[in-house]
């Protein structure tokens, strides 16, 4: 498969390494100082472009790739208020797009565990949820896209939590999300259900960027044969045999 990389920071380098190990060809690398490569024959020949940049650039990167007939897999967060526009491009123009806040297979299992635990804990009103996310100092947005996805899982599974906030003075129906930026931490997410007598905690701690990079390449391998607006839920269902992870956890 021919892959183009949009963004060539630490994630871009990790993706390149794993893609080559899996037998794929990197046909173009586009970074902040090489935007002209969007018009190169090499970029246009790509089966999929994998995009990891910054929120301010992400949407324009997607549009440029779509205009050149290249499918996009992206993990950039902090821009998703424009997601409806991307969905419209997929429906109207035949673009193909895959986005997730986190490509790690372990994190996506964690999403399912979080939703299931939240549904269970909603019956025990003495417990109140809170969340903390920790990332490297280079991460600009907060809370992380993964933390927001976890928050949506909690909100969707409970009746007494209706929104999330970063305000320490969170209301009773708000989920407090705290963030820290430290060193080169790849990503840690902690969900706590706290009561006056005990605390229940689930945690996912990434050890390196390789788990995210591998997930991005696996997603690209799938997207190369697909069309339209695609999600991580669909990919995970395919990986586990067309059965949702939440169903597996409940069984």
Image (cartoon, rainbow, N blue to C red):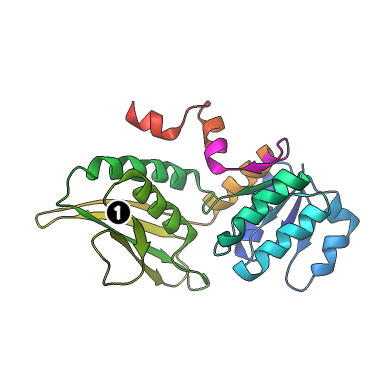
Residue placed at 59% from the left, 52% from the top? 213
Does residue 39 appear in the picture of this structure? yes
Query: The C terminus appears in which quarter of the rendering?
Result: top left
What residue sits 85% from the left and 52% below the top? 44
Look at the numbered disc 1 and give the secondary structure of its residue.
loop
At x 56%, y 61%, the residue is: 81
Which residue corresponds to the image point at 51% horizontal and 52% vertical from the top-left? 102
Taking depth in this image into account, of 181 and 175 the one nearest to the observer is 175
Residue 229: where, in percent of width, then height? 65, 44
Q: Is residue 189 left or right of residue 23?
A: left
Residue 239's place in the image compared with 115, above or below, is above
Task: Classify residue 120 as left or right of residue 58.
Answer: left
The image shows a total of numbered marks equal to: 1
Whether residue 167 is situated above or below residue 130 in the rendered picture: below
Using residue 190 as the reference point, say whether residue 135 is left or right of it: right
Q: Nearer the viewer, residue 105 or 76?
A: 76
Q: Horizontal and vertical percent for residue 86?
A: 67, 53
Magenta residue span? 223-235
Give the farthest residue toward the right.
41
Quarter of the image that includes the N terminus? top right
Q: Is residue 7 visible?
A: no
Could you say where residue 97 lies in the image, as x and y percent from the top left?
67, 48
Q: Nearer the viewer, residue 211 or 94?
A: 94
């Amino acid at each position: 498969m021919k892959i183009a990389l949009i963004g060539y920071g630490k994630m871009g380098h990790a993706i390149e390494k794993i893609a080559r190990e899996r037998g794929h060809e990197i046909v173009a690398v586009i970074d902040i100082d090489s935007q002209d490569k969007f018009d190169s024959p090499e970029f246009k020949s790509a089966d999929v472009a994998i995009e990891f940049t910054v929120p301010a650039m992400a949407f324009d990167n997607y549009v440029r790739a779509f205009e050149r007939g290249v499918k996009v897999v992206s993990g950039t967060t902090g821009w998703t208020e424009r997601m409806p526009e991307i969905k419209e491009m997929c429906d109207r123009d035949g673009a193909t797009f895959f986005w997730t806040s986190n490509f790690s297979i372990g994190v996506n299992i964690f999403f399912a565990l979080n939703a299931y635990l939240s549904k269970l804990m909603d019956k025990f009103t003495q417990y109140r949820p809170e969340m903390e996310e920790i990332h490297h100092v280079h991460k600009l947005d907060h809370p992380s896209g993964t933390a927001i996805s976890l928050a949506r899982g909690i909100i969707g599974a409970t009746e007494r939590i209706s929104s999330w906030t970063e305000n320490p003075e969170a209301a009773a129906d708000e989920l407090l999300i705290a963030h820290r930026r430290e060193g080169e931490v790849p990503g840690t997410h902690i969900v706590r259900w706290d009561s006056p007598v005990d605390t229940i905690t689930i945690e996912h701690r990434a050890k390196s960027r390789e788990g995210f990079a591998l997930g991005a390449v696996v997603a690209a391998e799938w997207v190369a044969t697909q069309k339209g607006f695609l999600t991580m839920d669909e990919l995970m269902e395919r990986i586990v045999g067309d059965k949702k992870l939440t169903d597996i956890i409940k069984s």
